Image (tube, rainbow, N blue to C red):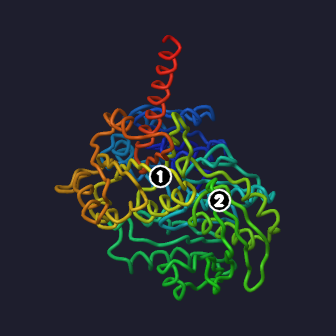
Amino acid sequence: MFRHIQHVHFVGIGGIGMSGIAEVLANLNFRVSGSDLKRSSVTDRLEQLGVEFFEGHNAENVGDSHVVVRSTAVRDDNPEIVEARRRSIPVIPRAEMLAELMRLKPHSVAVAGSHGKTTTTSMVATVLAAGKLDPTVVVGGVVKSLGSNARMGRSDLMVVEADESDRSFLMLTPTVAVVTNIDREHMDYYSDMTDVRDCFAKFVNKVPFYGAAILCLDDPNVQAVIPLVERRRMTYGLSAQADVSAHNIRFDQSYGSTFTVWRGTEPVGEISLRVPGLHNVYNSLAAISVGFELKLPFGQIAESLASFVNADRRFQFKGEEAGVRVVDDYGHHPTEIKATLAAAKIGSKGRRIVVLFQPHRYTRTKDLMEEFARSFNNADVLFVADIYAASEDPIEGVTAEALTDAIKSYGHKNAHYIGALEGATEILKGQVHEGDLFITLGAGNVYRTGERLLEALREDGAKEMASSLNS
């Protein structure tokens, strides 16, 4: 394919998944252009790599491109999509271009799952890079050890995050397929949970006969898929039946953990993590299993994971002002929210946990309303902001107020609807106190409110200091 393609244009290039592919193509010396609604640090980085960026969507942006790659968030009536189709320029989804990149590399690891994909992919990339395997990487978050969401390696190995949300991960053909968990999510693309499980089974069975499937045995839906898997398997979890397991898990007050890894019935050694929660123990077990599959020494795996720092927006420490510690997390599904708040509870003994949650998408809020309503028990105080639409149209009766009422109906004693984020900072400033852990939760732009809260607390502190000096 690539012999006939010189110019690739991306519509929605600022998206974290799209930008990684664009970066790899730019490093392969393709001419790359792209558009998005607004400039960002992501598009600035791409421009530094020689990518031509257009702010806003216009038909003329398509130029002389040979193929147009679209984000799932881009609608069919986008002027660039319309123009490309009018001129019979191929318009393909992100996953199809990712699949073509993977064809350039004989060996690949693809990480799929409803939750934990980005962190697990980042851990795998960190382990393999530290193991001198020099992988090419495309991940849905900025990997701190790489400084980007993409990395161009010189080896024949590639590590990618596989997106199950629209079934597009079925375009990928990895030699090692990882499944972290399977949950009720993206039900606009799936008829029921049987359909979801069957789709994951198809993904795993796309592995060639010489490859392997790495599966979380503790997840009931993944376990249900195992009888459908026709490839060599390696399982991981806390269960004694897992091929790779964690024992004697200890959590510390700096949001880290230490545990003993067993392979089969034999202990292998200790792992220490700097990232919080039991969910990250599971994520690391997946990365350890990949390391074992690729014959890396355990000591090398342990050393790389000990220094692993999570991707942006994954329990990301944003700062501390006036004794209020601010953390941001991308969690936008009930399972993710419960895992994040459980991790916060373990590492924050003595701190009050104050949460600002921004629901993401009307369809998700509607489909998972009851699950959301039972997800915030570890939040001492909860504020619910208006739903982030993510290009969706509103659904009658599906509102942040309705979600807040549902949360209260399930017994939460301190849940409040806060409305639009624009006015939230002033309200929150009067609600947080010294010693609090304040967490912004959601896949939208809620993190900006955490940043604004830090600025407001900093300004108030400066004013108080100036006042005391002048008195």
| Residue 248 position (above or below residue 388) | below
> Who is closer to the viewer here, 242 or 63?
242
Helix, strand or loop at label 2? It is loop
**In the image, which disc is placed on residue 240?**
none
Q: Amino acid at mark 2?
A: Asp
Q: Position of residue 81 (x, y in %)?
A: 37, 45
Q: Residue furthest bottom?
A: 227
Q: Position of residue 412 (x, y in %)?
A: 32, 60
> Who is closer to the viewer here, 3 or 307?
307
Q: Position of residue 341 (x, y in %)?
A: 47, 58
Q: Amino acid at mark 1?
A: Tyr
The answer to which quarter of the image holds residue 123 is bottom right
For disc 1, the marked residue is 330
Q: Residue furthest left?
A: 396
230 on left or right of 368 = right
Q: Residue furthest front?
A: 471
At label 1, counting other C-alpha atoms closer than 10 Å, the crowd grade (few under 14, some 14-19, many 20 or more) is many
222 on left or right of 305 = left
> Who is closer to the viewer here, 311 or 434?
434
**Camera-nearest label, 2 or 1:** 2
Label total for image: 2
Q: Residue at x 60, y 44 (%)?
A: 23
For disc 2, the marked residue is 252
Q: Which quadrant is home to the N terminus? A: bottom right
Please tell me which of labels 2 and 1 falls first in the chain.
Answer: 2
Helix, strand or loop at label 1? It is loop
Q: Residue at x 29, y 44 (%)?
A: 418
At label 2, counting other C-alpha atoms closer than 10 Å, the crowd grade (few under 14, some 14-19, many 20 or more) is some
